[in-house]
Image (tube, coloured by chain):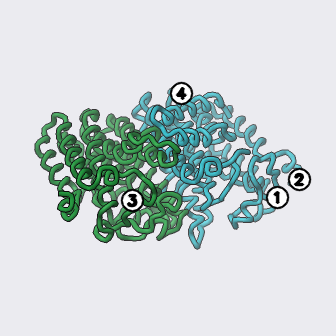
Chain colours: A green, B cyan
Amino acid sequence: MVGTARIEHALADALALGEAAGCPPRLAMALRHAVFPGGARVRPRLCLAVAHACGDDRPAVSDAAAASIELLHCASLVHDDLPCFDDAAVRRGRPSVHKAFGERLAVLAGDALIVLAFQTLARGGVHAPERLPGLLAQVCQAVGAPSGIVAGQAWECEALIRLDEYQRAKTGSLFAGAAAVGAVAAGADPEGWRTVGERLGEAYQVADDIGDAAGDPQQLGKPVGRDAALGRPSAARELGLAGAVSKLKQLVADAIESIPPCRGGPELRALILQEASRLLPEELARRAA
Amino acid sequence: MVGTARIEHALADALALGEAAGCPPRLAMALRHAVFPGGARVRPRLCLAVAHACGDDRPAVSDAAAASIELLHCASLVHDDLPCFDDAAVRRGRPSVHKAFGERLAVLAGDALIVLAFQTLARGGVHAPERLPGLLAQVCQAVGAPSGIVAGQAWECEALIRLDEYQRAKTGSLFAGAAAVGAVAAGADPEGWRTVGERLGEAYQVADDIGDAAGDPQQLGKPVGRDAALGRPSAARELGLAGAVSKLKQLVADAIESIPPCRGGPELRALILQEASRLLPEELARRAA
């Protein structure tokens, strides 16, 4: 979407807070390893795109909101990769944090990134203090219990998984939060934007399931076949490749349909369509057709 | 100090946020297990005592601040008890969270408690929005990188430990934060209060070291001898029992000495002395004399 340079800059500013004088050197290295170089930065780009569509009258607040969402996403990846969860050795084509720095620093780096996200939000919030409570509320809802990404991951520890809650919380919630927090950062009402984010999050999860079921590990920069190996629900396994691709397209259409009235609506629609075309490797789209 | 009932009530309110509809049932149970029944609630009591000394003109804000400090303390205990750190099977006389619910839910419960702390602070902050940025800044400084409790724990992962930073960050920082956030919650300047909290935190750490080196595991509700077994620094091992007890008394005197001018100063002094007398089991104080 927009603002890759803004996002990297905002993340560098945030990391500088955590790495200040007195930080244990290996913790500082682990934090940096978890955040740079990044993945697609999909969530913070969604956040900035929504802020832009809503006028983006306080760019410092939007930047802080986008960075905080990405820091929380990075924290969740570091903890999800731990031996007790996915036991993933590779992330974004490099060793995962626990492989590079050990399990203890992976737990602590995740914790520190969560705190850093709130610190970043608070620091950005001084440019529009009246928006800070709303920003915090949206971010906490997206991440914590009862229905944020932590809760999504926790459904994997239940004997009876509520699939709808699991999928909505595990991926949808942070996308919903990214869109909502972008709106709040620009002084807009978040409610309608949550649906846009949720549909895009579901689309992203379906694309991820497709990649895991049928993708190329080299191209994805991570191992494939993990959903089947770990018995996790997967749209690709439930619907087949063609069915999953068709579901992905419907979700993107639903997201566009639910964009609330705003001055930057047409531009945002175009961005989402462009982004969606990159969600699925061409070769997989051909195989599904 | 003061306000045990206020603290338990504020914590129950906070937990209710996390346990709301849709929460994975075992995550909700793990959160409750981590917070109730509590330990001595030393940090939130310090927070409320400082707020009281500063006038406590917004009790709902002070309650939220105290609860958020205790939630962060509980989160750190859950993560510190993990197999990759202390591998503690027992906490507060009961199974640790990872023993009761497994390692995955212990990681997630810690994460969720951190988020819940900020959510609680944000919710309380609506009663004095102009204080919210200051509350967040103090809490983040106490917990995150570069010098909060997460950084303190991370010093244990370095080849060369900077002992002063380690001890200040590992225990002192959350006490400093508890005192500072109590002051901010009551509209006062936090700076002088950080020193009061730091000295009390050091005193508490010395008392903990003494308990670990010479205490009774049944009375303490946790195993002893862990510092020696894990090669952790310990005032009791460095100074001997009598030296450590004398250091503890000096730290309490320093804390009292550094109380900033405030309307409730004499009352706070009396409370700190009363609290300090409970830090050390009588039998140990006798052995040291």
Q: Quadrant of the C terminus of chain A?
A: bottom left
Mark 2 vs 3: CB contact within 8 A: no
Q: Nearer the viewer, residue B268 or A271?
A: A271
Residue B138 seen in the figure: no
Residue B59 — which label?
4
Task: Give the distance between the C-alpha atoms of the residues marked 1 and 4, in whole angstroms.
Answer: 41 Å
Residue B241 — which label?
1
Residue in the picture at 49% in, 40% down: B24
Q: Tell if the residue under mark 1 belongs to the same chain as the one under mark 4.
A: yes
Precedes in sequence: disc 1 or disc 2: 1
Mark 1 vs 2: CB contact within 8 A: yes
Give the chain of mark 4.
B
Per the image, the residue denoted by label 3 is A15
Front disc: 2 or 3:
3
On the picture, is A146 further left or further right than B289?
left
Per the image, the residue denoted by label 2 is B287
Residue in the picture at 35% in, 49% down: A69
The quarter of the displayed image where residue A37 is located: bottom left
Where is residue A133 shown, x and y percent of the image?
37, 35
Precedes in sequence: disc 1 or disc 4: 4
Task: Give the distance between the C-alpha atoms of the residues marked 4 and 3, in whole angstroms.
Answer: 34 Å
The quarter of the displayed image where residue A33 is located: bottom left
Where is residue A198 shown, x and y percent of the image?
29, 42
